[in-house]
Image: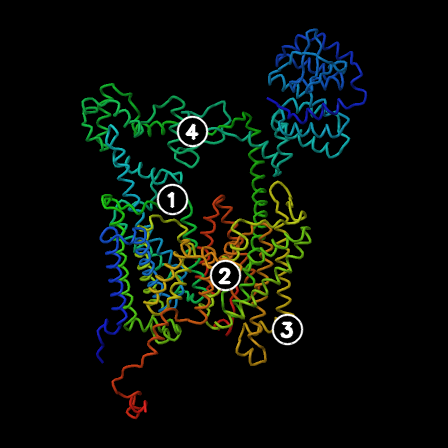
């Protein structure tokens, strides 16, 4: 049996990539840097960040929707990616500033003096003046870019290997991933862990060496990068779940024990997807935080990861475009409702202020989606597909020759 | 110098002035002493004033009053040589006790040395005072700041008729003997008499004896009481600290710091060159060294010790820890006593830690038991459990605003919180969880939706600021065993509450029809259903019961923590951990999990005090590793039920 080409087999991938390209083009043409200026820079940043969140949601869908691991620790990988790139952004920028100020001294600084001055500048806020060991590679962009995927990947590998080999699954696994996130967040909250405690890393929106380029242009560049990352990530995820590998991981989701008895190394499959998803999430984070400008340990709070799961569930898990739709719709709606721009809803006797009640509405609608629409928003597409009759071009309705023909059935 | 606190002197004075008829009585003896020594009273000297003070003290209560006023800088002397005690705007004659109007005395301002002598003398006279309160106050004053004079006074004082005061006096005498006696044997005997005692005052008496300082010398100092010799580079003395010591002795030159080198070079730039090296090259440390050496050779900068010289100087000396106390016999005895005290102290701290851990474990137990039971019966994790805890706490708060009596409101709040959260649990079960049977992950997420909605509703209703839930007076305070072991009453109460619920749960599970059915459904829902048990009803009842206990836990937690809408969130992760570590479906498992987590977090906290974040991080890592070895918890379910 010959297989159809990958893209023909999955027409939805083409649709998503086309929509993504169109969206990026439209935003570029409406931006302040490259177009009419209809969309302000802050909105471009929000849209770019939303694309990063969508990528994280795709990774979440990969682990949850396809392998059935409800990981409540994805945001840990997201934030780790952000921290890794943030180290370079902060170090390189501080180095430029410090070098400029030391150049006024009568004697040029030695490399050691320069490093000490940078360390003092960065860590003065937590009462330290030494560069921690974890910042040893912060001066090198290449090294930090490798660390963006390496650190979350290794963490996922270690955690996943420990968890999967002891056959922890289901609710237990969810709680454990949540615990891992919490532990990491608490560790980062400490001043002496070397990541500036609860101050986090800041000033990340300023890219060293690109000071001449304005934020308006940078925001569009980051939008392009985020869109490209989302497109590539989506393609990779779609390719991964379409072949035999995809069948095996879906089988693991549905009945892990049976797949194990069929001779598949279940732990290996789970580990591959878990680590890959962690890396994709980390890349999303590394693109997100330069647009957000600041990262601190609160980003790792367990609740953030649960929100990621909420987006995927509302969008429709088990299909990649569902994750994208959920992340985009819910995160944009959330920022609209909590931003105070949504009009108040006047009920008889009580005025609903959305800033106060959006969380309640989100929580309850989430319960309703879980109860009544387990397929989420993307279930709408199934429903639409059900309205149109399938195009069979007059062939049999069933598998064998005795089955009804389409014309006979209509009669 | 000795400073008797003013209240003591004031009290003594007030009592003396209050003696009936005292103001009218003249004291000719005192008058004579005053007239004779008026010059010395005007200009006292610390060395010579003692006999005069003793003389004045011997004249009776008026003399004591005079001394108290003198030490308190409330004594004035008139032109004609009379002494007046000034209290606010009034003045009385010190010798006759008669009020003097319109006097303008010259106030006496004795220096602190003189005041020390006066106050010691006052304490001595107070020790033999007939009034027990004054004797107790005098002992208090000595306990705060005892001197060698006090020691003598204590020894000279007559036996106290009050047994408790006598015991205190004996103890004080022993403590002062340790510190101030001139006889070495007496001091050693005193130390040995109290050896093994862990009270703060004994440890405080030992500390100055064992205080040491580090000194550097080429040979062991002959006349000093050496504690030990230390090698530089060890924990007790880093090499840098050793060099600082040599610098302080004047035996070594300061080392050249990088900053000093840079400043010296910057100060000596001539024509764009420092020491012959172009300024632009000075970014290289080696070039800086060359430039500095050139300057040194030219004599422009002071020579500084190089690293090698510094190290050689450090190695050329020996370092000794020397006791400030000269008597070796005393320090040996003190060292031995301190070691014994430390061992006992460690044991007692262990007990204290155990009590702390026990109370923390009871809180976790209360918070987690409901979660564990629902997980056992239905295999679902209720993410809204934390919000039920919060609901219970807010119920307590609302009841407190309605009912004034603290005890009564608490007694009403506990069952009411149970009822409210029981109802909420049943509603949640009927509306949501029942429809998601056999889909545990969906249940987890749906209950999470409920949790964020409930949290926000609480925020909208009660506001974001913390609401107080005040405990009744009989729950405030602490039970103190000694200086080390103490536990607050509220924690004892929570421990009792946890025990109560442990008993209640065991009773329900083992002795009632409901418990039997719950156990049956936990083991095998299908089989239980075919035996005529309605699993749906059982699940609902368990869910309600678990939620109800969360409400009770909420009231208990609210009594010592502030009630906010995030109250539940703070405990929910620990509760999950307790369930996971303990193993599901058994009360004993939850108990073991709560004990393990409570104990572990307290131990880590005590090893790393002041850093609760690190403690929590370690605890979670510990749990993740623990799960590797006991994936099903401490007390796993056995048999077929385990795989259900």
Residue A345 shown left or right of residue A243 in the figure = right
Nearer mark to the viewer, of 4 and 3? 3
- Callout 2: SS: strand
Q: Which residue is mark 4?
A: B319
- Discs 1, 4 touching: Cβ within 8 Å: no
Which of the 4 image quarters holds residue B257?
top left
Residue A160 shown left or right of residue A356 in the figure = left
Neighbor class of circle 4 (other Cα within 10 Å; few <14, some 14-19, many 20+) is: many
Q: Nearer the viewer, residue B204 or B52?
A: B52
Marks 4, 3 in one chain: yes
In space, the residues marked 4 and 3 are separated at their CA atoms by: 77 Å
Nearer mark to the viewer, of 1 and 3? 1
In space, the residues marked 1 and 2 are separated at their CA atoms by: 47 Å
Q: Which residue is mark 2?
A: A347
Residue at image position (36%, 72%) is: A380
Q: Residue furthest bottom?
A: A402
Q: Which residue is mark 3?
A: B513
Residue B273 shown left or right of residue A156 in the figure = left
Q: Nearer the viewer, residue A221 or A84?
A: A221
Nearer mark to the viewer, of 1 and 4? 1
Work out whether mark 4 precedes mark 3 in sequence or the reverse, and give the earlier one. 4
Which of the 4 image quarters holds residue A24?
bottom left
Q: Position of residue A321 (x, y in %)?
A: 32, 67
The disc at residue A196 is 1
Q: Position of residue A198 (x, y in %)?
A: 41, 46
Q: Position of residue B109 (x, y in %)?
A: 62, 15
The chain holding disc 1 is A
Marks 1, 4 in one chain: no
In space, the residues marked 4 and 2 are separated at their CA atoms by: 83 Å
In space, the residues marked 1 and 4 are separated at their CA atoms by: 39 Å
- Discs 3, 2 touching: Cβ within 8 Å: no
């Amino acid at each position: 049996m010959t297989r159809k080409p990958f893209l023909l087999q999955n027409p939805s991938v083409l649709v998503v990539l086309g929509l993504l390209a169109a969206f990026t083009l439209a935003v570029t043409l409406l931006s302040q840097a490259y177009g009419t200026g209809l969309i302000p820079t802050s909105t471009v940043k929000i849209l770019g960040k939303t694309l990063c969140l969508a990528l994280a949601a795709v990774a979440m869908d990969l682990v949850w929707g396809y392998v059935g691991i409800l990981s409540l620790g994805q945001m840990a990988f997201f934030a780790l990616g952000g921290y890794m790139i943030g180290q370079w952004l902060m170090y390189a920028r501080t180095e430029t500033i410090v070098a400029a100020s030391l150049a006024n001294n009568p004697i040029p600084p030695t490399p050691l003096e320069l490093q000490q001055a940078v360390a003092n500048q960065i860590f003065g806020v937590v009462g330290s003046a030494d560069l921690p060991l974890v910042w040893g590679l912060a001066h090198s962009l290449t090294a930090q870019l490798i660390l963006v995927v390496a650190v979350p990947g290794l963490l996922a590998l270690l955690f996943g290997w420990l968890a999967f080999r002891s056959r922890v699954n289901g609710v237990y696994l969810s709680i454990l991933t949540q615990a891992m996130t919490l532990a990491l967040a608490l560790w980062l909250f400490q001043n002496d862990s070397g990541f500036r405690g609860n101050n986090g890393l800041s000033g990340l929106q300023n890219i060293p060496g690109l000071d001449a380029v304005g934020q308006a242009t940078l925001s569009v560049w980051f939008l392009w990068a985020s869109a490209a990352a989302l497109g590539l990530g989506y393609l990779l995820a779609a390719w991964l779940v379409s072949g035999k590998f995809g069948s095996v991981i879906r089988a693991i989701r549905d009945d892990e024990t049976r797949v194990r008895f069929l001779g598949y190394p279940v732990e290996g499959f789970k580990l591959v997807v878990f680590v890959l998803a962690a890396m994709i999430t980390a890349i999303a984070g590394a693109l997100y935080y330069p647009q957000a400008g600041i990262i601190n340990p609160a980003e790792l709070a367990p609740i953030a990861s649960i929100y990621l799961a909420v987006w995927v569930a509302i969008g429709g898990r088990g299909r990649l475009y569902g994750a994208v739709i959920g992340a985009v719709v819910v995160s944009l709606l959330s920022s609209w409702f909590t931003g105070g721009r949504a009009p108040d809803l006047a009920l008889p006797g009580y005025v609903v202020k959305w800033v106060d009640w959006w969380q309640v509405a989100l929580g309850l609608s989430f319960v309703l989606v879980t109860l009544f629409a387990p397929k989420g928003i993307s279930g709408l597409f199934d429903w639409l597909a059900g309205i149109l009759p399938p195009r069979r071009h007059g062939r049999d309705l069933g598998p064998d020759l005795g089955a009804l023909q389409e014309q006979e059935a209509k009669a | 110098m000795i400073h008797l606190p003013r209240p003591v002197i004031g009290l003594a004075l007030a009592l003396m002035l209050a003696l009936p008829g005292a103001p009218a009585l003249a004291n000719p003896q005192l008058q004579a002493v005053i007239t004779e020594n008026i010059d010395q009273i005007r200009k006292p000297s610390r060395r010579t004033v003692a006999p005069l003070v003793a003389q004045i003290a011997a004249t009776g209560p008026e003399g004591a009053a005079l001394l108290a006023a003198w030490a308190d800088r409330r004594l004035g002397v008139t032109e004609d040589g009379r002494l007046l005690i000034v209290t606010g705007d009034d003045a009385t004659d010190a010798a006759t006790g008669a009020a003097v109007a319109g006097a303008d005395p010259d106030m006496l301002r004795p220096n602190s040395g003189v005041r020390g002598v006066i106050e010691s003398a006052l304490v001595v006279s107070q020790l033999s005072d007939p009034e027990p309160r004054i004797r107790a106050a005098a002992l208090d004053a000595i306990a705060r700041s005892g001197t060698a004079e006090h020691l003598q006074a204590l020894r000279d004082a007559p036996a106290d008729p009050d047994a408790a005061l006598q015991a205190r006096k004996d103890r004080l005498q022993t403590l002062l003997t340790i510190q101030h006696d001139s006889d070495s044997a007496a001091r050693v005997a005193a130390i040995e008499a109290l050896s093994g005692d862990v009270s703060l005052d004994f440890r405080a008496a030992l500390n100055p004896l064992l205080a040491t300082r580090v000194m550097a010398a080429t040979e062991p100092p002959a006349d000093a009481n050496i504690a030990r010799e230390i090698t530089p580079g060890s924990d007790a003395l880093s090499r840098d600290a050793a060099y600082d010591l040599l610098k302080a002795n004047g035996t070594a030159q300061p080392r050249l710091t990088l900053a000093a080198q840079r400043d010296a070079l910057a100060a000596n730039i001539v024509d764009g060159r420092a020491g012959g090296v172009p300024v632009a090259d000075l970014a290289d440390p080696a070039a800086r060294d060359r430039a500095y050496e050139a300057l040194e050779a030219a004599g422009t900068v002071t020579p500084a010790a190089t690293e090698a010289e510094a190290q050689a100087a450090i190695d050329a000396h020996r370092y000794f820890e020397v006791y400030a106390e000269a008597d070796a016999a005393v320090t040996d005895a003190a060292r031995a006593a301190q070691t014994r005290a430390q061992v006992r102290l460690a044991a007692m701290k262990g007990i204290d830690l155990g009590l702390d851990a026990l109370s923390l474990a009871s809180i976790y137990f209360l918070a987690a038991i409901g979660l564990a039971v629902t997980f056992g019966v239905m295999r679902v994790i209720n993410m809204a459990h934390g919000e039920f805890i919060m609901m219970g706490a807010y119920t307590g708060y609302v009841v407190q605003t309605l009912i004034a009596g603290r005890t009564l409101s608490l007694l009403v709040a506990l069952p009411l919180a149970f009822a409210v959260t029981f109802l909420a649990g049943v509603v949640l079960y009927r509306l949501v969880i029942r429809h998601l049977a056999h889909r545990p992950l969906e249940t987890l997420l749906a209950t999470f939706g409920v949790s964020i909605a409930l949290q926000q509703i609480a925020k909208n209703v009660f506001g974001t600021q913390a609401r107080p839930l005040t405990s009744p007076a009989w729950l405030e305070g602490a039970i103190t065993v000694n200086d080390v072991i103490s536990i607050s009453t509220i924690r004892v109460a929570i421990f009792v509450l946890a025990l109560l619920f442990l008993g209640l749960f065991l009773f329900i599970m083992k002795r009632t029809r409901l418990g039997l059915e719950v156990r049956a459904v936990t083991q095998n829902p299908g089989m239980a259903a075919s035996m005529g048990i309605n699993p749906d009803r059982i699940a609902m009842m368990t869910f309600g019961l678990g939620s109800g206990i969360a409400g009770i836990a909420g009231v208990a937690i609210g009594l010592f923590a502030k009630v906010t809408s995030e109250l539940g969130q703070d405990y929910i992760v620990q509760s999950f951990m307790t369930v996971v570590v303990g193993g599901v479906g058994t009360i004993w498992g939850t108990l073991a999990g709560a004990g393990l987590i409570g104990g572990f977090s307290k131990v880590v906290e005590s090893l790393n005090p002041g850093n609760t974040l690190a403690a929590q991080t370690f605890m979670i890592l510990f749990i993740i590793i623990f799960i590797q070895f006991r994936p099903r918890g401490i007390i796993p379910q056995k048999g077929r039920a385990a795989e259900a």
